[in-house]
Image (cartoon, helix red, strand yellow):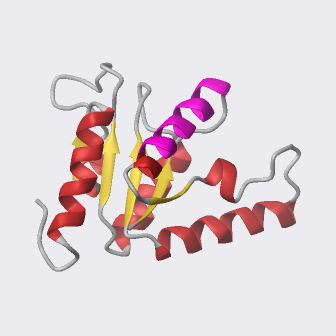
Amino acid sequence: MKVYLAGPLFSEAEREFNQRLKALLDREGYSVFLPQEDSNEKTPPHHHRQKEKIFRENLRAIEECDLVVAVLDGSDADSGTAWEIGYASAIGKPVIGLKTDFRTLGPEGRVNLMIEQSITRLCTTTDELVNGVQELKTLGSGESWI
């Protein structure tokens, strides 16, 4: 199963968490596309041609994946991650959100309404995430997960 791992990648802490999630999913036998390693240029500035290349590589990876895992920590989802969720949802890809951060957007929910309606499941721990990915794999592509 191919997994696209979406998440913020602008701080050392964010990149390390993403790498930890990738390693966890790798150990479970999944093929993980991590944009910070698999498509992004390692050093800024990103010139227009590099930006277009990064965008196209990430777009292709979302289209070719079986599942998107999206890190939603923070007071609100990273804008790039939110876009990746929306695109994946629009083309019919299941999306599992991971929000280990206990901050909420108010009494009604833990994530933005548009994100909430675009994801298949919201997990709050990495163990729950691994179990959710396994459950989705077990169901197969022809069955409903919700």
Along the line of sight, which residue is nearer the eye, 135 or 88? 135
Along the line of sight, which residue is nearer the eye, 94 or 118? 94
Residue 58 pos. (x, y %): 60, 64
Residue placed at 66% from the left, 28% from the top?
11
Image quadrant in which you'd find residue 89:
bottom left
Location of the C terminus by quadrant is bottom left
Residue placed at 27% from the left, 35% from the top?
127
112 horizontally vs 83: left or right: left
Q: Is residue 126 above or below residue 40?
A: above
Along the line of sight, which residue is nearer the eye, 20 or 92? 20
Decide if residue 88 is in sight here. Answer: yes
114 horizontally vs 72: left or right: left
Q: Is residue 73 above or below residue 78?
A: above
Residue placed at 67% from the left, 65% from the top?
55
Residue placed at 66% from the left, 48% from the top?
36
Furthest residue in direction top, as rendered: 102
The dominant secondary structure in magenta is: helix
* Residue 92 in magenta stretch: no
Residue 84 pos. (x, y %): 48, 58
Along the line of sight, which residue is nearer the eye, 40 or 118? 40
Residue 67 pos. (x, y %): 36, 63
59 horizontally vs 74: left or right: right
* Residue 13 in magenta stretch: yes
| Residues rendered magenta in the picture | 12-24
56 horizontally vs 97: left or right: right
